[in-house]
Amino acid sequence: MGASVSLSERAAKRIAEILKAEGAGAMLRISVEGGGCSGFQYKFDVARDRAADDMVIARDDAVVLVDPTSVGFLSGAEVDFVDDLIGASFRINNPNATASCGCGTSFSV
């Protein structure tokens, strides 16, 4: 696959913490679904199974899976972890999004 998705250092650290708490074999799955206030939304799940066509992103102890359909929406994106006044959350800096909601969990293309 020519598409790429990257993890910031902060995101990799937080994902590794989450996966360590989940036990051996845990991975984070990021997917894109229809819905949200801007048309599409990001979904984060802990997964134990990897499909043969999943994109695997590994940084330090963080392992992230992205299904082929979602890769098209996330191509060139960076997953970051932000801890600010409104709370701690993963944020996806997505160059494909033409608009996004204020909370950063949904977007349109």
Image: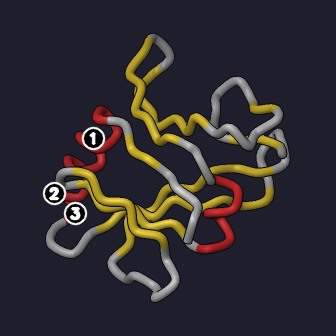
Which of the image's four quarters has the N terminus? bottom right
Q: Is residue 18 left or right of residue 69?
A: left
Q: CA distance from mark 2 to mark 1?
A: 10 Å
> What residue does disc 3 label?
22
Q: CA distance from mark 3 to mark 2?
A: 5 Å
> What residue does disc 1 label?
14
Residue 2 is marked as none
Mark 2 and mark 3 in contact (Cβ < 8 Å)?
yes
Q: CA distance from mark 1 to mark 3?
A: 13 Å
Q: Amino acid at mark 3?
A: Glu
Residue 20 is marked as 2
Q: Which label's residue is closer to the chain start, 1 or 3? A: 1
What's the image's color scheme?
A: secondary structure
Residue 34, horizontal then vertical, whole percent: 79, 59
Q: Amino acid at mark 1?
A: Arg
Q: Secondary structure at mark 2?
A: helix
Q: Residue at x 30, y 32 (%)?
A: 10
Q: Amino acid at mark 2?
A: Lys
Q: Residue at x 82, y 40 (%)?
A: 37
